[in-house]
Image: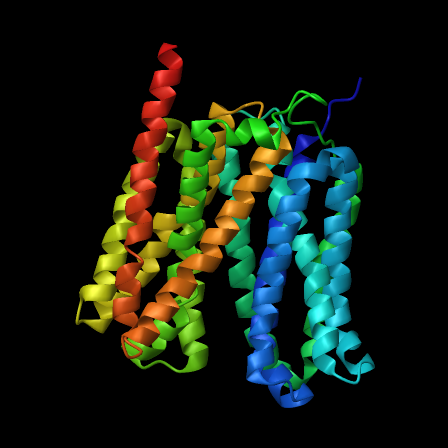
């Protein structure tokens, strides 16, 4: 009997997270191009990320209820097909409509469906594989989103520098090759079930478990801690250091993604030597320090250091929460991963919005906006203490 090649499964999921990074980060690099070439208003362009994340939230919710009936393999293959078709469509579909914005939004929704499926499915697919030290594997898996984000910004920026922004459609087609080629991996790699059919916890059962709601709090705070800084990193680099937009993108979001990826690789390599909850508590404390440093210091260089190191501090939060929740609710199944992904997305949407609104109320003072972001790592640490106490109480029973 041939042994199953779970390394192929892991490779497919690595490429899956890179695909998610492509779908999340490519279109924002083209916002001004859409504005200039298609005469799309900036107000309409602001709806593009809204449509992307709203679609992901809807997919998260639907997956919690239906993905077990569809089957992991069909759903994850569909994620790659939707991601690839959406990216290719972005190069051609806008010009087929009287209003190009309609074509852009259709493509964004198509590849956002793929991204949402990736977000929900890749983690439980890897969790179901018979790997040792799964929390390490999960951390390393999520690092590929970081490396994908860096690759998208660097490769696309260099391509535009070498061949001109007017050739952006070629870049869209090049990036589409990643998910389209990955279809073959997901179609043939071994995929196990996280729990036996019919034995996973229902949404109602999850909602009755106090540990589940603490995990939801951790995911909301993880998403908010990460994206509140990440989405404002470029603006911070420009306002604090006076960098150009291009350099601000490279120093801000790129360095943030790099340090976040390093954090996940570090835990992926040495995680078995460290208690995950204690590591996350330390990460929460470091994250709080970074928010305080970026928002309070008058020295712009130290402020930028706080912004970049924050990427390292948030790296373990999302994958670590998934590992903790899965270990404490082993029968949670797909519904657990889907609902936690939705909670993370809600935090990722709410956090940057809060920072932006407070910044506006404070007379466009981004430091005051980031100061409000301190609440997220604080709540994360409170949630971790609650999780530990609930786990101890459960063990005693």
Look at the image and tell me in which quarter the N terminus lies: top right
Residue 269 in view in this figure = no
310 relative to 94, above or below: above
Residue drawn at the location 73% of the way across and 67% of the way down: 107
Q: Percent from the top left, x then y, of residue 64?
A: 64, 39
Query: In screen coordinates, is 10 left or right of 374?
Result: right
Q: Percent from the top left, x then y, of residue 315?
A: 41, 48
Q: Nearer the viewer, residue 314 or 217?
A: 217
Query: In screen coordinates, is 300 left or right of 307?
Result: left
Look at the image and tell me in which quarter the C terminus lies: top left
30 relative to 388, above or below: below
Query: In screen coordinates, is 294 left or right of 347?
Result: left
Q: Percent from the top left, x then y, of residue 130?
A: 61, 24
Marker count (numbered): 0
Residue drawn at the location 22% of the way across and 60% of the way down: 293
Q: For residue 338, which quarter of the picture?
A: top right
205 relative to 179, above or below: above
Q: Percent from the top left, x then y, of residue 373?
A: 31, 58
Residue drawn at the location 52% of the way across and 32% of the way down: 207
């Amino acid at each position: 009997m041939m042994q199953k090649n779970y390394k192929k499964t892991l490779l497919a999921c690595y490429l899956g997270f890179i695909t998610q990074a492509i779908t999340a980060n490519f279109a924002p690099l083209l916002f001004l191009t859409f504005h200039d070439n298609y005469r799309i208003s900036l107000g309409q362009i602001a709806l593009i990320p809204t449509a992307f994340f709203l679609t992901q939230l809807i997919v998260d919710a639907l997956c919690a209820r239906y993905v077990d009936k569809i089957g992991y393999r069909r759903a994850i293959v569909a994620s790659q097909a939707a991601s690839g078709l959406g990216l290719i469509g972005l190069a051609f579909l806008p010009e087929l409509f009287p209003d190009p914005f309609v074509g852009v939004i259709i493509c964004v929704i198509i590849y956002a469906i793929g991204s949402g499926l990736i977000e929900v499915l890749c983690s439980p697919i890897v969790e179901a594989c018979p790997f040792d030290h799964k929390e390490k594997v999960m951390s390393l898996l999520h690092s590929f989103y970081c490396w994908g984000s860096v690759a998208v910004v660097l490769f696309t920026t260099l391509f535009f520098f070498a061949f001109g922004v007017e050739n952006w459609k070629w870049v869209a087609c090049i990036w589409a090759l990643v998910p389209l080629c990955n279809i073959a991996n997901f179609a043939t790699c071994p995929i196990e079930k996280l729990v036996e059919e019919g034995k996973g916890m229902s949404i109602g059962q999850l909602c009755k478990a106090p540990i589940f709601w603490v995990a939801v709090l951790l995911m909301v705070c993880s998403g908010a801690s990460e994206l509140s800084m990440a989405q404002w990193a470029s603006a911070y680099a420009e306002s604090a250091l006076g960098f150009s937009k291009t350099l601000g993108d490279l120093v801000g979001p790129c360095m943030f993604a790099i340090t976040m990826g390093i954090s996940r690789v570090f835990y992926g390599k040495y995680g078995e030597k460290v208690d995950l909850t204690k590591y996350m508590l330390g990460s929460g404390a470091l994250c709080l320090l970074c928010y305080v440093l970026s928002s309070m210091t008058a020295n712009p260089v130290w402020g930028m250091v706080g912004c970049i190191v924050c990427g390292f501090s948030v790296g373990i939060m999302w994958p670590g929460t998934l590992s903790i929740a899965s270990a404490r609710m082993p029968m949670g199944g797909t519904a657990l991963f889907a609902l936690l992904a939705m909670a993370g997305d809600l935090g990722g949407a709410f956090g940057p919005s809060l920072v932006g609104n407070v910044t506006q109320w404070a007379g466009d003072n981004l430091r005051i906006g980031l100061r409000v972001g301190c609440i997220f790592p604080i709540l994360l640490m409170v949630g971790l203490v609650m999780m530990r106490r609930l786990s101890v109480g459960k063990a005693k029973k």
